[in-house]
Amino acid sequence: MTILLSTLNARYAHASLGLRYLLANMGELQAQTKLHEFVIGAKTTEVVERLLAHKPRIVGFGIYIWNVEETTKVIAMLKRVAPEVTVVLGGPEVSHETNEQAAVKLADYVITGWGDITFPQLCAQILNGPKPLMKVHAGQQPPMGEIALPYKFYTIEDIAHRTIYVEASRGCPFKCEFCLSSLDKTAWPFPLDAFLDELEALHARGARLFKFVDRTFNLNVKTSQRIMQFFLDKLAANPGDPVYAHFELVPDHLPEALKETISKFPPGALQFEIGIQSFNPEVQALVSRRQDNAKAADNIRWLCEHSHAHMHVDLIAGLPGEDVASFARGFDKLVGLGAHEIQFGILKRLRGTPIIRHTEPFGMVYDPYPPYTILATNLIDFATMQRLVRFARYWDLVANSGRFTNTIPHLLGAHPFDNFMTFSDWMYTRTDATHRIALDRLANLVKEWLQQRGMAKDEAAALIASDYAGRADSPAEKAKPTAAAPERQLRHLVA
């Protein structure tokens, strides 16, 4: 009598925090509960075969925007070959607009929202009776101190090869309409001492890379400082065995006390993800985003100039009321602030988010299939939106990758967005592709572009060669001791 927890992760390096929370909170059913993760792209028949090898009575699937289509196929096949197996769904994708979805129609039960308490209760009813009559169950939100923390369920293999996701809090007090967190009433912290004890246990087991999924890590500065001090203590105790931590920051909330703590971190130990999304005040107002743009810009500039933190800053194209010229101004501003990576995102209509209220007034046209990407607005037509999609992909390959750090300033010049858009259009005409471009070919294309823009052949070759010489995956760099920071950030460091 086995309960099986499963999901299709975006890649192997991602370990599902949500499933581990469910396992940690199974209570008396924990002994008969197992976890089996897969990766999107796996063959459906093989996934079903491996699930059934556990002889499950219940299979619980975590459903997200990136895996819903493939998981729907898995559920359909599972119900055909083993209709006696009870399928329970949960996760953000099925928590809203629930009854419209094919996966929900195939499943036996769905839990919307928090599943920590509701999933084990539902499993007990399925196994022991009385069998639930309702298909959809609203997840019960317990006090944070009553949720069992999941970190002991990261295996030694997880710690060695996968990203360790942790959270000091859940929820978000802000109401940005493109984000599912806008539906939260506030942010709820876990008891801090218990959480720090779990970090200590993870570190003792060998974890060195910690990715915090908190939406607003710096909302409570005293809590932020205590958590950062945990990592500073580890770095001080053993600088030859570094730790690396990733946090998402509110951009306009960086008091002096927090700056002082941040400034103590050495290179390669800290990454901040900051969601700017738009610098246009009118667009921000439309999507209910509260942000002091001047303070946010000052804070990003300070972090880039006075800390060793790796800066990853987000912008979203396709928001209601924003045209290409407005987006370009925001992009150029971020380039000028010195962020190491600018994540150029394309708006997606997440199920349940209030962004849908702008659909008709702003001519928002979305792909009907996941991940529901914006295809056009009344200010950006479909063809232009596709140019932006290609820009985002080439930007990731050339700029964000850290492989062309010396070359990027020459590509961008005084007008970063316009110049890189011109380069992006040219790249597409030369390759007719945005994926599967080998690094050597990419480097040669960048060199060819520089020459077309007037750079001497020898100078362009030397510039590209200087980036190759500084690559973190070059033989010289491979010989250095392994750092905790991910490879992409290491490339920025060595450049």
Image (cartoon, rainbow, N blue to C red):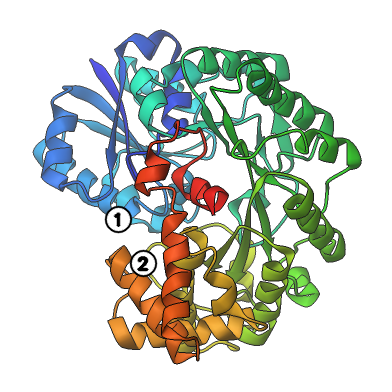
- The quarter in which the C terminus is drawn is bottom right
Answer few, some or many: residues within 10 Å of disc 2's Cα (few below 14, many 20 plus, some between 14 and 19): few
Q: Which mark is residue 69?
A: 1
In percent of the image, x 49 and y 90: which residue is there?
453
- In this rendering, position of residue 19 left or right of residue 144: left
| Label 1 secondary element | helix
Kind of residue at badge 1: Glu
How many numbered marks does the figure carry? 2
In percent of the image, x 48 and y 64: which residue is there?
404
Q: Nearer the viewer, residue 331 or 9?
A: 331
Q: Position of residue 355 (x, y in %)?
A: 61, 67
Q: Position of residue 34 (x, y in %)?
A: 30, 20
Toward which corner of the image does residue 55 lie, by quadrant?
Answer: top left
Q: Nearer the viewer, residue 39 or 157?
A: 157
Residue tagged 2 = 369
Answer few, some or many: residues within 10 Å of disc 1's Cα (few below 14, many 20 plus, some between 14 and 19): some
Kind of residue at badge 2: Tyr
- The quarter in which the N terminus is drawn is top left
- In this rendering, position of residue 307 left or right of residue 146: right
Residue most extreme to the front: 458
Q: Nearer the viewer, residue 50 or 338?
A: 338
Q: Which mark is residue 411?
A: none
Residue most extreme to the right: 256
* CB under 8 Å between discs 1 and 2: yes
Q: Is residue 20 above or below residue 260?
A: above
Can residue 161 be seen from the camera position used here? yes
Can residue 321 be seen from the camera position used here? no
Q: Is residue 344 above or below residue 238?
A: below
Q: Position of residue 3 (x, y in %)?
A: 29, 21
